């Protein structure tokens, strides 16, 4: 029983550490989207196409 | 305490993914569109001219959002998908060890399939994915002739049957797991449960043949240096590179997949010893069939066969985005891996360590599913323009459907961080709304199936009269790519304009919209299916079945 509880604790702690750490990294490195949007021209009537996806 | 381990870990997993999006607002990415209150229009039941891709999901959403706000409903559904999928997989594994069940739960609930389809916005497909372990459990109980198992199969399959692919995933698994002795019951039930989309598809004028362009565009792809086969065996390999988590491109992933296959193979032998050979073989062979279907178009000659199939066999278009069928493989992989770990732990002194490592493996090899897939999923609010247009269309007496411009199925709005998203208009506006059904992959168009849309496109391009095609309104969506010819708008009368939307009235007499599938048989089939699901629920909830069992056992004793 104690092993199981220890395992769960380790799993939860591991998940927290892994994702928390990466989250902090991503938060620090992602571009500031507001700046991009302010500079972006309104795309309507400019032609172009919205891709469903790329391979 | 122990019995809460699997649901507890499943809930933690679900929260780990969805925590950043649990607030108010909508998650709108690719095919995922929820609206504050979805209208019930003919297309929701497959009675329009468009192909019944989201039938009866749209009708179900229309009913549910009349009670619960759409954004709340979306979060509840997404949470239940992740929570119930993991829990069901853990529960399915025949073992005394809760820790081994946890391993299966994490492997099923933190899979590449789930991550990619979530980012692709295929929430209804993921509903089916979450149902699969519960369907398998109920069908296996039916094979063992346990009481009320058939009712459980129906209830477990029902949520999955809100879309064609989801319905097929669930009912085929149920038929296979329940065994051939039960075919006489399971096969008719499987057909019945899927009638809400089968009937509109069969009765739809114009048939359901698809464009062969989509065969290459939607074929499974290699996510790293290995072949598509290995990507698919690791439950990944979706056609769209944009929704594949970056971690799937790591060079070690194919090695990790091969390792998991070896462990799963060991575990599946152990599964056969506990369940019996026939049910285990059924589950595994169906999984293998899913993998073969998924990679078929990437094999030599496979794309030619598929091109022929989609252009000649009605409904074969369901096989175009073939990686969807890998859902069948995810279940034996997760259960087999967990039992393989249990078998291996007998030879190790530090069993807890092994379990912990096995549990953490999916998370550590694909950490970028956590926290809303590293904030690729975020909540946004619809601009007020949408509510204004909705009210205006709801109150106006003029008949006619709505056409959205620019002609494109997908949008990129700055208010949604320029994410690619399906045009939300058909799920917000209280009238049948026509959107373009041509989609672009790598800039190349993949033709749609709706002849009415093709006719409307020609009319827009030649600046013809839209009223003759049953279009009474034109909605122009601003600041999304695509050109709107000013000459088309000059013929129309502006009724509303805002920063994001402009609504135009089409002047003149509006022709009647072209007919779709006949309503009577479709609605009758829907009622039969509802009655069937309601009956199964009552059979599970009410004590009627128990009285029969008691009286039978009493008769046997006498």
Image (spheres, coloured by chain):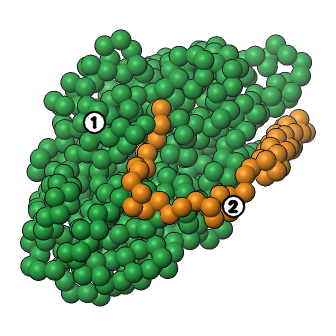
Chain colours: A orange, B green
Label 2 neighbour load within 10 Å: few <14, some 14-19, many 20+: few
Image coordinates for residue B394, horizontal then vertical, percent: 31, 83
Asked if residue B519 is positioned above or below residue B291 in the image, the reply reads below
Left or right, B551 with reference to B379: left
Residue appearing at x 37%, y 76% in the figure: B502
Residue B244 horizontal/vertical position (percent): 57, 36
Instruction: Find disc 2 in the rendering and name its residue.
Output: A35
Chain label for disc 2 = A
For disc 1, the chain is B
Q: Name the one closer to the observer, B533 or B415.
A: B415
Q: Which residue is mark 1?
A: B317
Q: Is residue B229 left or right of residue B4?
A: left
The quarter holding residue B447 reads: top left
Q: Position of residue B485 (x, y in %)?
A: 29, 63
Identify which residue, B329 or A5, lies in the foreground: B329
Q: Residue at x 32, y 71 (%)?
A: B475
């Amino acid at each position: 029983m104690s092993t199981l509880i220890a395992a769960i604790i380790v799993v939860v702690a591991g998940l927290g550490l892994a994702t928390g750490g990466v989250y902090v990294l991503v938060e620090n490195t992602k571009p500031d989207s507001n700046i991009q949007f302010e500079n972006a021209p309104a795309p309507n009537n400019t032609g172009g196409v919205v891709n469903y996806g790329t391979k | 305490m122990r019995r809460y381990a699997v649901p507890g870990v499943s809930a933690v997993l679900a929260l780990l993914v969805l925590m950043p999006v649990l607030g108010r607002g909508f998650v709108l990415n690719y095919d995922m569109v929820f609206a504050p209150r979805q209208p019930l229009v003919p297309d929701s039941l497959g009675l329009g001219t468009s192909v019944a891709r989201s039938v009866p999901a749209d009708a179900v959403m229309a009913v549910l959002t009349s009670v619960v706000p759409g954004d709340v409903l979306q979060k509840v559904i997404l949470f239940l998908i992740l929570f119930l999928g993991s829990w069901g997989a853990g529960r399915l594994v025949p073992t005394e060890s809760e820790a081994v069940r946890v391993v299966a739960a994490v492997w099923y609930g933190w899979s590449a399939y789930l991550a990619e389809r979530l980012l692709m916005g295929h929430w209804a497909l993921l509903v089916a994915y979450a149902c699969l372990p519960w369907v398998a459990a109920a069908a296996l109980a039916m094979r063992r002739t346990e009481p009320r198992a058939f009712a459980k199969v129906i209830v477990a399959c029902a949520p999955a049957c809100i879309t064609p692919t989801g319905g097929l995933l669930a009912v085929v698994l149920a038929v296979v797991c329940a065994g051939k002795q039960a075919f006489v019951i399971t096969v008719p039930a499987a057909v019945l449960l899927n009638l809400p989309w089968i009937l509109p598809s069969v009765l739809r004028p114009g048939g359901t043949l698809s464009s062969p362009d989509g065969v290459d565009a939607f074929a499974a792809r290699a996510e790293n240096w290995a072949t598509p086969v290995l990507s698919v065996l690791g439950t990944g390999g979706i056609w769209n590179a944009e929704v594949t988590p970056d971690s799937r491109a790591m060079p070690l992933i194919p090695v990790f997949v091969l390792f998991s296959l070896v462990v799963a193979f060991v575990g599946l032998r152990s599964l056969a010893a506990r369940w019996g050979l026939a049910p285990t073989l059924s589950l595994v062979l169906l999984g293998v069939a899913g993998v073969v279907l998924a990679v078929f178009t990437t094999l030599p000659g496979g794309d030619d066969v598929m091109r022929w199939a989609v252009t000649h066999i009605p409904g074969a278009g369901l096989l175009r985005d073939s990686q969807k069928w890998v859902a069948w493989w995810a279940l034996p992989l997760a259960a087999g891996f967990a039992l393989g770990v249990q078998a291996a732990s007998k030879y190790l002194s530090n069993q807890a360590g092994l379990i912990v490592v096995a549990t953490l493996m999916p998370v550590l090899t694909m950490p970028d599913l956590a926290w809303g897939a590293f904030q690729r999923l975020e909540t946004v609010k619809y601009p007020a323009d949408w509510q204004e247009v909705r009210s205006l269309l709801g109150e106006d007496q003029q008949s006619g459907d709505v056409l959205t411009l620019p002609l494109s199925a997908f949008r990129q709005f700055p208010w949604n961080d320029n994410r690619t998203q399906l045009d939300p208009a058909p799920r917000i506006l209280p009238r049948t709304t026509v959107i373009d059904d041509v989609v672009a992959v790598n800039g190349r168009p993949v033709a749609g199936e709706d002849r009415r849309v093709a006719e409307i496109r020609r009319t827009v391009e030649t600046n013809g009269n839209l009223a003759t095609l049953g279009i009474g309104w034109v909605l122009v969506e601003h600041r999304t790519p695509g050109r709107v010819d000013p000459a088309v708008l000059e013929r129309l009368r502006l009724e509303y304009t805002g920063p994001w939307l402009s609504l135009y009235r089409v002047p003149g007499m509006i022709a009647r919209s072209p007919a779709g599938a006949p309503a009577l048989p479709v609605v009758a089939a829907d009622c039969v299916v509802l009655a069937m699901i309601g009956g199964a629920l009552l059979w599970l909830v009410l004590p009627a079945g128990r009285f029969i069992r008691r009286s039978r056992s009493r008769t046997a004793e006498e």
